[in-house]
């Protein structure tokens, strides 16, 4: 019989590989009709001629949401309005500093247990070491299984808010970040089923709903509270089960992007000034099973390609693009293979290197991004770091200055910390345990 952590890791590999499969709310695989799926490998559309140019808080007082907060010492407090071990003003906020920590930074992991959902918070010191602060209720429900997504959490460091998905009850939550704890602010339902990924753009947050045909929707955020944006809910590509992996926003805030694993397509939406979205523009992916993506500061988008994941060993790759005017994709590099298996999550560091977790081959791959946006494998072996058997690397995040990279290993139930150098090489620092159902990782 499989252990819990092994089951979670296997589910993650299956989800990463899920071409033609969807996921039930418990995270297990479910067969999906693959008829009419898009083909991979075609030339991506782009402009014909010229390359495009590159542009005090008040927590909610709500009876409908659980606002119990787990404090760092293991005790539980009431909602921020009721007090959580520190005095509160009339606004309901804590008197403690709401800045996520004055030294170092912070790291957050989504617990996603089957039942009440939670976030585990860590303080990061200047050496990159992590210290757990506690586990904090999100007011929503988890699934206890893998999500098959990148971006289950999003953080606004400047405003000291954390945003998370609750896939077990189709809701999202906001939590305020204090020096030594988190406090729940708001919980709101989504209009779709099984939210799995979030993206922030100024005062707007966009949510990816993954089940069935899927959808994206936008919310205005004010003091951590959500308000649905009229005209900001749009369908995905139109396939009955596209198995989307991530939603993200271009650095200039002009376009929303979604990768679809089952259709081998990348969908874009123009973001209008009021936060509403234009209709979807569907682009073919250069490689099969497009999954995670990240942007350089000037808008180069590197996308990992799982190529069927565990069912196609050694076939993983990555492509690089720019989102051009009108939502079409301008291609830089087409499906550069790494020789690894189940490439899923991706993180850009130092604005010139992309690191991919390879869930099926228990390692990391690196790509160098040149000044023109093209990518090359670095090192040529395709392996940047080997974890060893049964680690199952999933999500990744980096410190605000990219000096440290953190990888969530789903089979080993731990976060592995690395220091980085200017050549994109990694040095392993240490490992920190996390709950075995953990999915999603974000930090600064």
Image (cartoon, grey):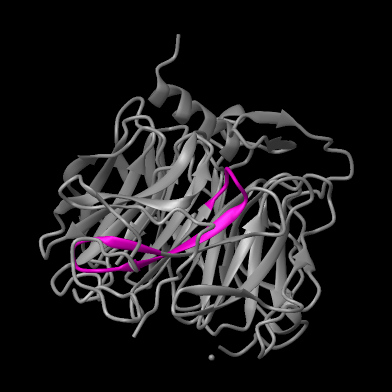
Q: Nearer the viewer, residue 426 or 144?
A: 144
Residue 183 falls within the magenta-colored stretch: yes
- Image position of 20 (left or right of 150): right
Q: Quadrant of residue 286?
A: bottom right
Residue 178 falls within the magenta-colored stretch: yes
Image quadrant occupied by the C terminus: bottom left
Q: Nearer the viewer, residue 250 or 123?
A: 123
Residue 297's spot in the image, x, y percent?
44, 79
* Residue plotted at (25% across, 76% down): 99
Observer able to see residue 381: no
**What span is colored magenta in the figure?**
166-184
Q: Nearer the viewer, residue 95 or 433?
A: 95
Depicted 11 relative to depicted 41: above or below: above
* Residue plotted at (40% across, 57% down): 67
* Residue plotted at (62% across, 83% down): 254
Q: Quadrant of residue 231?
A: bottom right
Image quadrant occupied by the N terminus: top left
Farthest residue, direction top:
1
Q: Nearer the viewer, residue 233 or 416?
A: 233
């Amino acid at each position: 019989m499989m252990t819990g952590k092994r089951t979670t890791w296997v589910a993650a590999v299956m989800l990463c590989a899920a071409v033609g499969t969807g996921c039930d709310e418990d995270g297990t695989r479910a067969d999906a009709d693959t008829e009419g799926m898009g083909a991979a490998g075609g030339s991506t559309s782009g402009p014909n001629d010229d390359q495009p140019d590159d542009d005090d808080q008040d927590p909610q007082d709500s009876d409908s949401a659980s606002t119990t907060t787990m404090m760092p010492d293991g005790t539980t407090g009431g909602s921020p309005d009721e007090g959580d071990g520190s005095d509160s003003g009339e606004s309901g906020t804590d008197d403690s500093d709401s800045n996520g920590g004055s030294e170092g930074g912070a790291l957050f992991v989504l617990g996603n247990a089957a039942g009440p959902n939670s976030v585990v918070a860590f303080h990061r010191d200047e050496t990159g070491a992590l210290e757990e602060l506690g586990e904090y209720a999100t007011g929503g429900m988890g699934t206890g299984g893998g999500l098959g997504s990148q971006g289950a959490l999003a953080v606004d460091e400047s405003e000291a808010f954390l945003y998370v998905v609750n896939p077990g009850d189709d809701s999202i939550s906001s939590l305020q970040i204090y020096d030594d704890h988190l406090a729940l602010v708001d919980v709101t339902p989504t209009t779709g089923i099984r939210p799995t990924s979030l993206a922030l753009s100024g005062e707007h947050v966009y949510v990816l709903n993954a089940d069935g045909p899927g959808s994206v929707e936008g919310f205005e955020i004010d003091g951590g509270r959500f308000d649905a944006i009229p005209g900001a809910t749009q369908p995905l590509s139109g396939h009955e089960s596209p198995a989307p992996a991530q939603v993200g926003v271009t650095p200039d805030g002009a376009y929303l992007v979604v990768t679809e694993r089952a259709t081998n397509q990348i969908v874009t939406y123009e973001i209008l000034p009021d936060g509403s979205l234009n209709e979807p523009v569907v682009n073919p992916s250069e490689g099969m099973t497009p999954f995670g993506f990240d942007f350089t500061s000037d808008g180069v988008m590197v996308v990992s390609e799982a190529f069927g994941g565990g069912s196609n060993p050694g076939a993983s790759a990555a492509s690089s693009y720019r989102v051009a005017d009108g939502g079409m994709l301008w291609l830089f590099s087409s499906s550069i293979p790494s020789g690894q298996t189940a490439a899923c999550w991706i993180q850009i560091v130092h604005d010139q290197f992309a690191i991919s977790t390879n869930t099926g081959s228990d390692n990391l791959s690196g790509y160098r991004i040149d000044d023109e946006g093209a990518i090359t494998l670095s090192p040529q072996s395709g392996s940047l770091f080997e974890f060893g058997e049964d680690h199952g690397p999933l999500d990744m995040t980096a410190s605000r200055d990219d000096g440290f990279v953190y990888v969530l290993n789903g089979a080993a139930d731990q976060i592995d910390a690395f220091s980085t150098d200017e050549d994109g090489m990694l040095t392993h620092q240490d490992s920190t345990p996390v709950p075995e159902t953990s999915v999603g990782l974000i930090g600064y």
